[in-house]
């Protein structure tokens, strides 16, 4: 019996701990996180804002007390004249009441100014905290963690919304309200200890009822109308998203989409309204409870005044305090905004805790010293295996590859063979699951410098298109060369993009994005030239390893071949890794490596691999045959002059599919 009683009690305590303690603990932890962010953003501003918040909370109560005293002194002043002591007393109280209102107004204006300042500092602090965490995340594995990317996305969305620009103001308002409410409750307790308790209870019931009413709407939309709401969101996106909007307009779908959006949105909202209508009684009951609690307190006040226990002054003070206690119970936009901001602050700090150690983590001893001298880099992969987080099968399996300094290596293979993954590992963006990767004997993560001495230059398939000037887009390859127009011009010329300089309205200063003053959007091919020029600038700046991961997919094969050849001659003193599907484009590379099953399946120069009759030879001949078909067809149609030799095999623009064979 005793044992089951103790088990029951333990269960009750466990439940209480879980429900009550957690309910308080989480908002408290979140609030502390926001306080930390405020403190980090600007200590002095935080102090003055806190000071003003408390003053603005106390001021209405002080004014209420002064008002009561003034009302109490009015009969004396009227009876004895303003020159009498009672008259002077009434004037003093009136002066204090006026001062209270005036100070409130000035304080409010001052706090608005401080909040504006605080919001900008807070934005910077949030950006800095999250940015440092994300940039310092060592390799990309941590960023690929679904929890981390969800937190990052949430913080980013918060930053993009207007919400974060209202954080300081909302926090100030909420704290001022609660301070004022607490103070009013204290004053009212001198009339009757139970009065503030009854009022707070009334507010609690109303809040629970309205919360329940609101939640019913959310639950209904989640359970029944979620699909419709998502669809409405999607349709709205189709209407306003610029790239999509173009196609929508061409097909004349705007009207249909507009109607469809309205219909779907109404259908989703109908679910909410229905759920809320059927729960309206909870709102009515909550409001009735609040009115009843206020009725009890006010009736007691009136009754005791009627009995002569309270004078006009006291009645004024207590009456104002009854209204003031409402500040404790009020729920509204400032509270929701603060709840959201505190939760986001927690996420941001969690992120910096989870990712932060990577910034401080010392490099492994083997890679502590990184040679930074000029010259080509040696690449050495030994028994490298790699599996993406969350994936069962490895992409690379015990792969061995050594590239001597200055050699150009083309990496080819079917779709999904792991070519891009290999380049990312060599760049140090992911650590290998097994084995080791060394660039001149050092860990690539030590090489991937964000300073001027970066020794690895890369152009990925999805290279960055900075919404910055042409100068920045090219010059960011090597920061010391950012202002060196000669170096940038030569790189642009070598990448085949000289005409960009003359075509763009403001030359180097043209912003490469529409939506900016004088901004211009480039074509896919022009962007590729800019990205290649950036890589060439990096090589000029000291990069000894250049990686090109299919940056030329938008070019036709002849243009790609010419460009690769030009790159190979321009970067003769640089170790180069080229990734492509078009085998004709890489014939002039010193060496060709065929990836298959996560390993190096074939390794040699073009002639050797062709003669060996293996996988590479089969892929190459297949592309050549396709070209021959293509050339025959062209002969019949427009008599275009083509040479159908295997050497020109890559001129078949559709060769990509052949590599998959
Ligand atoms: N971030 C990632 N997370 C999980 N799996 C990935 C990720 N990136 C690539 N993969 C998987 O790894 C495998 C190899 O991809 P990778 O992009 O390296 O191949 P690839 O040879 O470059 O292909 P393609 O020729 O199509 O560009 C594929 O199965 C792909 O689905």
Image (tube, helix red, strand yellow):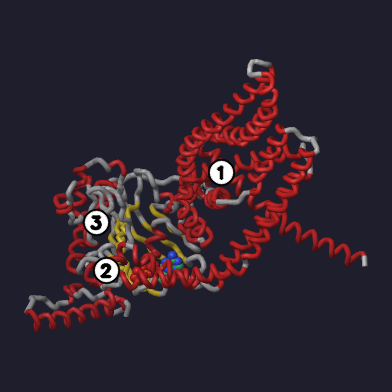
In-image side of 190 versus 169 (left or right) = right
Q: Are marks 3 and 2 in contact (CB under 8 Å)?
A: no
Q: Quadrant of residue 609?
A: bottom left
Task: Please tell me whether mark 1 or mark 3 is closer to you in this view.
Answer: 1
Q: Which residue is mark 1?
A: 171
Q: Are marks 1 and 2 in contact (CB under 8 Å)?
A: no
Can you give x and y, in whole percent of width and height, for residue 397 in the image?
45, 70
Question: Dot 2 lies on which element?
Answer: helix
Q: Is residue 282 visible?
A: yes
Above or below: residue 364 compared with residue 184: below
Q: Quadrant of residue 3?
A: bottom right
Q: Residue furthest right?
A: 1
Per the model, the C-alpha gap separating discs 1 and 3 is 42 Å
In-image side of 230 versus 85 (left or right) = left
Give ligand 1's quarter of the image: bottom left
Q: Is residue 571 visible?
A: no
| Residue ID at (14%, 54%) | 499
| Residue ID at (87%, 62%) | 6
Labels 1 and 2: the sequence-earlier one = 1
Rendered image: mark on residue 9 = none
Can you give x and y, in whole percent of width and height, for residue 449 in the image?
39, 47
Q: Quadrant of residue 100?
A: top right
Labels 1 and 3: the sequence-earlier one = 1
Crowding near the residue tagged with mark 1, few <14, some 14–19, many ≥20 C-alpha atoms within 10 Å:
many
Crowding near the residue tagged with mark 3, few <14, some 14–19, many ≥20 C-alpha atoms within 10 Å:
some
Which is more toward the observer, 656 or 187?
A: 187
Per the model, the C-alpha gap separating discs 1 and 2 is 44 Å
Q: Which residue is mark 3?
A: 521
Disc count in the image?
3
Labels 3 and 2: the sequence-earlier one = 2
Rendered image: mark on residue 249 = 2
């Amino acid at each position: 019996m005793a044992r089951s009683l103790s088990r029951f009690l333990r269960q009750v305590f466990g439940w209480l701990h879980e429900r009550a303690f957690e309910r308080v603990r989480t908002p408290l932890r979140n609030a502390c996180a926001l306080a930390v962010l405020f403190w980090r953003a600007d200590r002095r501003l935080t102090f003055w804002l806190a000071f003003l918040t408390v003053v603005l909370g106390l001021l209405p109560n002080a004014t209420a007390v002064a008002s009561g005293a003034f009302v109490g002194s009015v009969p004396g002043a009227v009876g004895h004249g303003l020159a009498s002591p009672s008259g002077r007393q009434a004037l003093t109280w009136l002066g204090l009441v006026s001062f209270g209102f005036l100070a409130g107004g000035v304080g409010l204006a001052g706090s608005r100014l401080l909040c504006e300042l605080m919001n900008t500092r807070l934005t910077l602090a949030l950006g800095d905290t999250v940015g440092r965490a994300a940039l310092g995340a060592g390799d990309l594995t941590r960023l690929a963690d679904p929890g981390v990317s969800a937190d990052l996305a949430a913080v980013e969305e918060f930053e993009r919304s207007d919400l974060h620009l209202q954080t300081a103001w909302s926090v100030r308002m909420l704290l001022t309200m609660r301070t004022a409410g607490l103070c009013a409750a204290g004053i009212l307790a001198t009339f009757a200890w139970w009065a503030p308790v009854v009022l707070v209870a009334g507010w609690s019931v109303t809040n629970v009822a309205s919360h329940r009413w609101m939640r019913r709407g959310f639950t209904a939309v989640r359970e029944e109308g979620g699909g419709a709401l998502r669809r409405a969101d999607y349709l709205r996106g189709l209407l306003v998203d610029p790239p999509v909007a173009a196609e929508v307009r061409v097909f004349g779908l705007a009207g249909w989409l507009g109607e469809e959006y309205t219909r779907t949105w109404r259908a989703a909202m109908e679910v909410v309204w229905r759920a809320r209508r059927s729960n309206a009684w909870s709102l009515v009951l909550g409001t009735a409870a609040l009115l009843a609690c206020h009725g009890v307190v006010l009736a007691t006040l009136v009754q005791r005044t009627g009995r002569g226990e309270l004078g006009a002054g006291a009645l004024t003070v207590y009456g104002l305090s009854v209204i003031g206690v409402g500040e404790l119970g009020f729920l509204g936009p400032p509270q929701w905004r603060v709840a959201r901001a505190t939760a986001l602050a927690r996420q941001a700090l969690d992120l910096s805790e989870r990712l932060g150690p990577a910034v401080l983590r010392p490099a492994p001893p083997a890679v502590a010293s990184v040679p930074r001298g000029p010259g080509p880099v040696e690449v050495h992969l030994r028994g490298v295996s790699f599996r993406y987080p969350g994936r069962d099968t490895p992409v690379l399996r015990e792969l061995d590859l050594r590239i001597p300094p200055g050699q150009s290596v083309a990496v080819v293979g079917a779709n999904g063979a792991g070519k891009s993954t290999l380049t990312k590992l060599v760049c140090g963006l992911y650590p290998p699951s097994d084995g080791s990767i060394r660039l001149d004997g050092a860990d690539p993560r030590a090489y991937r410098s964000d300073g001027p001495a970066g020794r690895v230059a890369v152009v990925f398939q999805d290279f960055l298109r900075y919404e910055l000037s042409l100068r920045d887009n090219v010059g960011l390859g090597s920061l010391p060369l950012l202002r060196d127009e000669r170096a940038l011009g030569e790189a642009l010329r070598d990448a085949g993009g000289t005409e960009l300089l003359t075509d763009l309205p403001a030359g180097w200063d043209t912003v490469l994005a529409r939506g900016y003053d004088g901004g211009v959007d480039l074509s896919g091919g022009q962007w590729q030239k800019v990205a290649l020029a950036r890589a060439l600038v990096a090589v000029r700046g000291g990069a000894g390893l250049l990686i090109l991961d299919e940056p030329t997919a938008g070019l036709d094969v002849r243009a790609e071949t010419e460009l690769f050849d030009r790159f190979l001659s321009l970067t003769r003193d640089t170790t180069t890794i080229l990734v492509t599907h078009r085998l004709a484009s890489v014939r002039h590379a010193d060496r060709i490596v065929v990836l298959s099953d996560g390993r190096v399946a074939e390794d040699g120069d073009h002639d050797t691999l062709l003669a060996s009759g293996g996988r590479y030879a089969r892929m190459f001949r297949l592309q050549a045959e396709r070209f021959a078909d293509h050339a025959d067809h062209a002969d019949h149609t427009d008599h275009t002059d083509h040479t159908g030799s295997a050497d020109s095999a890559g001129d078949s623009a559709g060769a990509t599919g052949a590599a998959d064979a």
